[in-house]
Amino acid sequence: MTKATLHYTDKLVKNAVSAFWWRTVGWKFIASLVFLAAYFAYALASGMHSWTTAALGVLLILGLVLIGSLYVVHLRGSLARFRRMRVKQACLETTPDRLRLSSDMGSSDVDWSAVTEVWRFNDFWLLFFSRAQFVTLPLADLSDEVRHIVLDRVKSHGGKIL
């Protein structure tokens, strides 16, 4: 069994949510919205006041609401959990079969097969249990041994490493 004490900060939580948001939304979606906004502005300026122009405007608004909501919902939830922690740290324990995370708010003990993906970033990794449920592992607190174990266990149980 390996153990690591994970230290969390407000900045780390915000950076993790931003990284999740950016990778989820992606530059292609942002580029699509920019193109849509430009075409909508052109249509309005050219006097094209039809149902298609209105539909274009609705699509643009829906897209902006979608990406804005995705960010705000995850940021609020993550910061709320972080701020409820009295001690801004957690303990990570790994065994060949299980992963355990515990803090003053409780603990979670799961099989490695429950980790569907690991998203690697410079300062942290995001371990996913579903498309939108993840935990943040600050890399400053993980030894090379623990990093290797996490990646090896996730891979060997069918999870993706990105």
Image: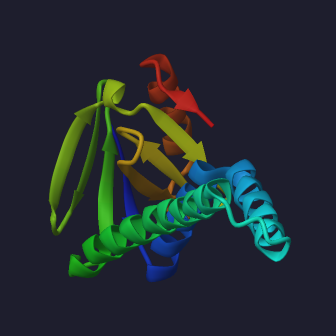
Question: Is 43 rendered above or below residue 142?
Answer: below
* Image quadrant occupied by the N terminus: top left
Residue found at x 43% / y 66%: 69
Q: Is residue 107 visible?
A: yes
Q: Nearer the viewer, residue 137 or 144?
A: 137
Q: How is the image coloured?
A: rainbow
- Where residue 139 sits, quadrant-wise, is bottom right
Residue found at x 51% / y 80%: 11
- Where residue 57 sits, quadrant-wise, is bottom right
- Where residue 112 sits, quadrant-wise, is top left
Residue found at x 35% / y 74%: 76
Number of numbered discs: 0
Q: Is residue 7 visible?
A: no
In the image: residue 127, left or right of residue 51: left
In the image: residue 19, left or right of residue 27: left
> x, y (%) of residue 4?
39, 55
Q: Nearer the viewer, residue 147 or 117?
A: 117
* Image quadrant occupied by the C terminus: top right
In the image: residue 37, left or right of residue 138: right
Question: Is 81 rendered above or below residue 101?
Answer: below
> x, y (%) of residue 122?
68, 58
Residue found at x 51% / y 60%: 62
In the image: residue 70, left or right of residue 21: left
> x, y (%) of residue 32?
74, 53
> x, y (%) of residue 92?
33, 51
